[in-house]
Structure formats: C-alpha cells, structure tokens
Image (cartoon, rainbow, N blue to C red):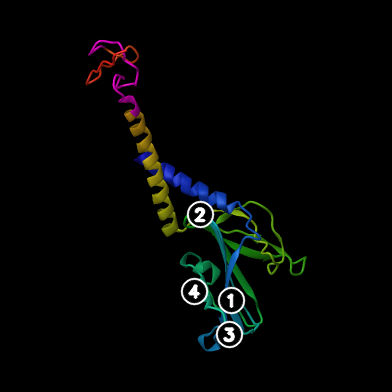
Amino acid sequence: MLLAVALGLATTLAVAVGFASRSVYGTWTPIYGGRLRNPVGGEGRGEFRANLFGARGVVVIEAFAREYEPDLSSMPPPETLIPDWAEGAVAPWIGGFEPWPEPEQTERRAARASGWPMVALWHEYDWRYDTALPAKGAYTTPGGLLLEPSVGNPGAWPIDYPRAIPLRPIWRGLLIDWSLFASAWLAMLTLVPFVRHRLRRKPGNCRGCGYDLSGLEAGTHCPECGSTPRRARVRRA
C-alpha cells in the first residue's frame, strides 16, 4: 500500500514535469475574456482582459490591465477564465491584493500549470524590462526552475513564455492525480502476484514455486524449493 502511494506521487510529479518541459506553441486552444474597467470601483479607465491557453497537460493563463478601450461586449467576463490557483498571481487587483495600475500604465501577469489528468503544479511568469533595450527584457519564473532563456517582447505572438519546471502545488489537482496514479499502481502491484499465484496453482505443480511435480509421490517435498504442497496431487505421465 505504501509503495503504491509513493509510486503514485512520483508518477504525478513526473507527469507534471514532463508536460511542463514541452513546447506547446501552435497547439493552443485559446479562450479570451475582457471587459472595460470600472472607474467607480477604483479600477480606472481602460480594459481588463484575461486569456486562457490550453493544451493536453498544460494551461497558461494571462491577464492584463491597460488604457485601451475596445469593444469587449462579445467576450465572457475575464474573471470567469482565471482559476483559483492563479488569481492572486495573475490578477491580484481583483481580490484587492494590489491596487489597479494607473490608466496610462499597462500591467501584464501570467502563470503556467501542468499535469494530467488534472494540472497539479504551477509557476508564475514575471517580465523584467532591460533598461538598456527599450521594450525588451526577459521573463523570470517565480515558483519554477527556468529551463531556457527568454528574451523578447511580452506582447509577441506566439506567446514567447519560456519553459520551466513548476514547483508550486495545486492541491486539488495534485491530490486527484495522486489518488488515480496510486490506485493504478496498487492494482498492478496486486494483480501481478495474483496472476503469478494462479499460474503456480496448476494441478501437479508446487504451490510455493510452481515447479512441475509430475511423477513424484503424493506429499513429496518439492525438489526445487523444499516445500510440501498443501494438497498434493500427482499428475500421471
């Protein structure tokens, strides 16, 4: 049981890290949401937008607030696209964790999660501008180990987010994946001895090691392992 639990956790982490190391550019299934910011609610002018990009085993969520005011009436509310695990990092303005950026400023946040069948680990993306290169800089990955350098424009397409190994747990997804993989391991660890035992129970075979006892007298010790069958049966040649 404990071995199945340990193997289930190891499999969950290995799957999450494996998906995190994949480049998924060109395979995204994007969902976009947006609305105008509410000056009465202290959000200032402009828009608030969220983009959710998904592929098998990987989810990237980004949100930004800026002064631009397009027609967003056909889009779903951006808050509905932001999962609970990412809200504080991706849209800290919603929960009051941080004040909304000034109308003339653009603030962009992003995070990436991986795992299967549920995302189980995640990390943030933080854009750092290079003062020597206008509109240039690099991403850092708080909560993750960066696997590759990233230098570019945060508004580029396709999204130039670098790959990183996530280290922060998404507890609900982690526990679900862990339970599923642990159950699978427990089934395999239980099935193998059961099948082996059933194969050894052929009439005339030793119950201890499966050695063929054909031709030996009933109750004779097994010449292979020394055990005596509980129900000695002689198979006639």
Reading the image, the residue beneath label 2 is 115
- Marks 1/3 in contact by CB < 8 Å: the verdict is no
Residue 80 is tagged as 4
Q: Nearer the viewer, mark 1 or mark 3?
A: 1
Quarter holding the N terminus?
A: top left
Q: Position of residue 147 (x, y in %)?
A: 64, 51
Residue 44 is tagged as 3
Who comes first in sequence, dot 3 or dot 2?
A: 3
Q: CA distance from mark 4 to mark 3?
A: 20 Å
Q: Position of residue 104 (x, y in %)?
A: 66, 82
Is 204 covered by the magenta stretch?
yes
Q: Main secondary structure of the magenta part?
A: loop
Reading the image, the residue beneath label 1 is 49
Who comes first in sequence, dot 4 or dot 3?
A: 3
Q: CA distance from mark 2 to mark 4?
A: 21 Å
Residue at disc 4, secondary structure: helix
Nearest the camera: 98 or 160?
A: 160
Residue at disc 3, secondary structure: loop
- The three-letter amino acid code for the residue at tag 2 is Gly
The stretch of residues the image draws in magenta is: 199-220
- Is residue 97 something that shows in the picture? no
Residue at disc 1, secondary structure: strand
Q: Position of residue 50 (x, y in %)?
A: 57, 73
Q: Position of residue 113 (x, y in %)?
A: 53, 59
Q: Residue at position x 30%, y 14% from top?
A: 222
